[in-house]
Image (spheres, helix red, strand yellow):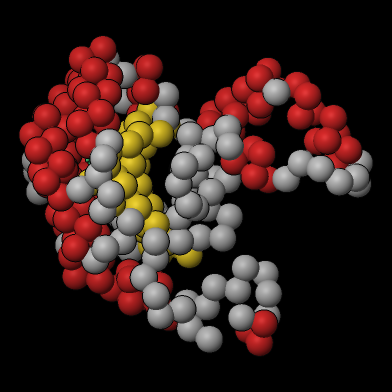
Amino acid sequence: MLSKTLPKHIAIIMDGNGRWAKSRGLPRLEGHRRGVEVAEEMITAVHNRRIPYLTLYAFSDENWNRPKEEVDTLMVLLELFLKSKQQKMIDKGIRFQTIGAISKLPENVQQTIAETKEMTAKGNQMTLILALSYGARNEIMNAITRLVRETPSLLEPVLSEVEGGEGWGEGTLNQFLDTKNYPDPDLLIRTSGEYRLSNFLLWQLAYTELYFTKTMWPDFSESDLQKALEEYAKRERRFGKISEQL
Ligand code: FPP
């Protein structure tokens, strides 16, 4: 049986801004500027299709290692994006959320993030999640640390399950991840011809359909999104079962 339905949650690794700019003899900043425009176009396209969750990998843990000038530019673009789109998000019923180590971001960006979350909290058409200063291993380590610290009484059933007993399930760890309030992505898109997950949502992508395209993010368009959705619709999601069981 083919899954003809749309995904409920799309996650995107928006890659290739730098190479796109370089191939045109432009500064990397131009690639990122165009990248933000494409992000906005995709948010609209996903919203128009009534897909309820979109997660965009906007800034990774490792991106802090880029030259300071580029990091600063990305922070400025992020802040400008949020400030200039707040009203549009409210009008369209888009709830803004983040995952990642937000406390590492500059103070002004943190404030704008908090303000945008608050202003859009009632949005019930779509949840837009930006991954910022995000790394999946870090997220999982933090989740385990907090789980142990905050709920030591949960440890007994954990140990009991590890030893073959009843108790604790994956859902318990889920509750401590940054993504606890969202369903796992159904479809992951990565642009720019790189075939890696790059420390993105490692736990949550366990059963996600992966879609890779050589298109650089600044060239990604609604028709590329449509192609990914058509490919997704053809995939058979078996979650470990056989076709006849679905
Ligand atoms: C990858 O290109 C992209 C990033 C490092 C993140 C930047 C993302 C955007 C500008 C979109 C931001 C969206 C919002 C909504 C603020 P790259 O620089 O890694 O490209 P390269 O691999 O070709 O160097």
Report the label total: 0
Position above or below: 99 against 198: above
Q: Is residue 78 visible?
A: no
Residue pictured at 20% horizontal, 31% vertical: 119
Q: In this view of the protein, which residue sits in the foreground, 164 or 27? A: 164
Q: In this view of the protein, which residue sits in the foreground, 142 or 124? A: 124
Does residue 184 appear left or right of residue 151 in this picture? left
Q: Is residue 47 visible?
A: yes
Ligand 1 image position (quadrant): top left
How far across and how far down the image is residue 2, in percent?
48, 83
How far across and how far down the image is residue 207, in percent?
56, 60
Residue located farthest toward the top when viewing the structure as drawn: 107
Q: In this view of the protein, which residue sits in the foreground, 203 or 245? A: 245
Position above or below: 33 against 186: above
- Residue 117 appears in which quarter of the rendering? top left
Residue pictured at 49% horizontal, 53% vertical: 184
- Point out the image quarter for the C terminus: bottom right
Residue pictured at 33% horizontal, 56% vertical: 52
How far across and how far down the image is residue 143, in percent?
60, 29
Does residue 58 appear left or right of residue 239 in this picture? left
How far across and how far down the image is residue 188, in percent?
41, 57
Residue pictured at 15% horizontal, 50% vertical: 92
